[in-house]
Image (tube, rainbow, N blue to C red):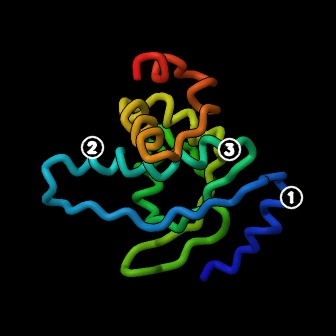
Amino acid sequence: MFKIDVLNFSRQNNYREIWHIGRFAVSRTEKDGAKLLKQLIALAIYPICEKNGAVMVAECDKKFVRGLNLLGIKTKQLGPGIEYLGSETIPIYSTSEWLREFLYATPNFEHVAKFYETNGLFNDQLNNDKYDLLKISA
């Protein structure tokens, strides 16, 4: 849709893994919609954060990208946006290092780490980096 050569982008920037994040949808009538959205984001980016040299790519509504940046998720635009479903949609990327800054700062970190551990998806790299207490208290 955006005619971006993601593999070439990855090679030029020495990213070893490319992850794509799809669409998030939370009902506007949901009382705790913002909290739920933050939890979904944390769950989605956790595996990316486990990898050094990984990059996340996504197509997002321009307003949503501004919201991500306000949440503390640094993003960069990969190319020009297009009008899609009545608003401008832009291709973005964020590195695992940038995503980690958000993940470590979110109150959802412990909950998300325990989710991955409970479901056999746990990798010690994130917790060894910053949160050894999770393993001790579990």
Disc on the earlier residue, 2 or 3: 2
Disc on the earlier residue, 2 or 1: 1
Q: Secondary structure at mark 1?
A: helix
In the image, residue 108 lies at what x, y percent?
37, 35
* Mark-to-mark CA distance, 2 and 3: 25 Å
Q: Is residue 64 left or right of residue 124?
A: left
Q: Is residue 35 left or right of residue 6?
A: left
Amino acid residing under circle 2? Lys
Q: Is residue 40 left or right of residue 73?
A: left
Disc on the earlier residue, 3 or 1: 1
Q: Which mark is residue 35?
A: 2
Q: Which residue is mark 1?
A: 12
The C terminus lies in which quarter of the figure? top left
Q: Which residue appears at 53% of the width and 40% of the height?
A: 122
Q: Which mark is residue 51?
A: 3
In the image, residue 8 lies at what x, y percent?
82, 68
Q: Which residue appears at 28% of the width and 48% of the height?
A: 36
Mark 3 vs mark 1: in front: 3
State how many labels appear: 3
In the image, residue 72 lies at what x, y percent?
48, 38
Of 71 and 116, the residue lying toward us: 116
Amino acid residing under circle 1? Gln
Is 24 placed above or below 130 here?
below
Mark 2 vs mark 3: in front: 3
Q: Which mark is residue 40?
A: none
Q: Residues within 10 Å of mark 1 (few under 14, many from 20)?
A: few
Q: Which residue appears at 72% of the width and 56% of the height?
A: 17
Amino acid residing under circle 3? Lys
* Mark-to-mark CA distance, 2 and 1: 36 Å
Q: Secondary structure at mark 2?
A: helix
